[in-house]
Image: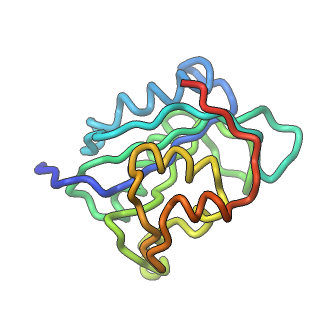
Amino acid sequence: MSQPDGGIYIALGANLPGSSGTPRETLEAALALFPSQDMRVLRHSSWWRSPAQPAGDQPDFINGMVEVATALEPAEVLARLHDLESRFGRVRRKRWEARVLDLDLIDYRGRQSGGAEGTPVLPHPRLRERLFVLLPLQEVAPNWRHPADGMEIQNLIMLANPLKINKIE
């Protein structure tokens, strides 16, 4: 399958160990499978550690961001991300629970979609408030702008919910 230029951003997160080891090892193992899902990783952020959101008694998350190139449509990308999550043992029971792997389609080449007819909501509806998404996104796409209003990523970071987050790599 031919793979056009990137502009597709996927957030990665984990806060539970899995069959691949620590959360970070699980994230790296999942990333290694992206090519088998017809997604070529172009750029990869550092790994970041942050507390679970909303705050609770869960372990800290390890988060990152990748830019990929693929010829897949957004719904196909999301389906493959969910398949990878399942392969690593994620079971979706309730919102904001601890998880062995979380893969979110953040932006697909600036497309905007309300999620009708089986298409994902684009850009990701909660990215504005999540420093654990915005800071890694800034690493891989320092000139990124929100597709809906053109707001620069630096401004989004300043307006996001405060969060203790640390780069670990």
- Left or right of residue 124, residue 9 in this image: left
- Left or right of residue 120, residue 7 in this image: left
Q: Which residue is drawn at 53% across and 33% down?
A: 88
Percent coordinates x, y for residue 31 in the rendering: 40, 33
Asked whether 132 or 15 is in front, the reply is: 132
Q: Residue furthest top?
A: 21
- Left or right of residue 74, residue 30 in this image: right
Q: Quadrant of residue 49?
A: top right
In the image, residue 79 above or below residue 15? below
Q: Residue at x 77, y 40 (%)?
A: 51
Q: Quadrant of residue 156?
A: bottom right
Q: Which residue is drawn at 33% across and 59% down?
A: 76
In the image, residue 56 above or below residue 62? below
Q: Residue at x 52, y 39 (%)?
A: 64
- Left or right of residue 160, residue 118 in this image: left
Percent coordinates x, y for residue 42 in the rendering: 28, 40
In the image, residue 73 above or below residue 33? below
Percent coordinates x, y for residue 144 in the rendering: 40, 60
Q: How is the image coloured?
A: rainbow
Q: Which residue lies furthest to the right in this view?
A: 57
Percent coordinates x, y for residue 118 in the rendering: 43, 74
Q: How many labels does the image show?
A: 0
Asked whether 96 or 122 is in front, the reply is: 122
Asked whether 88 or 146 is in front, the reply is: 146
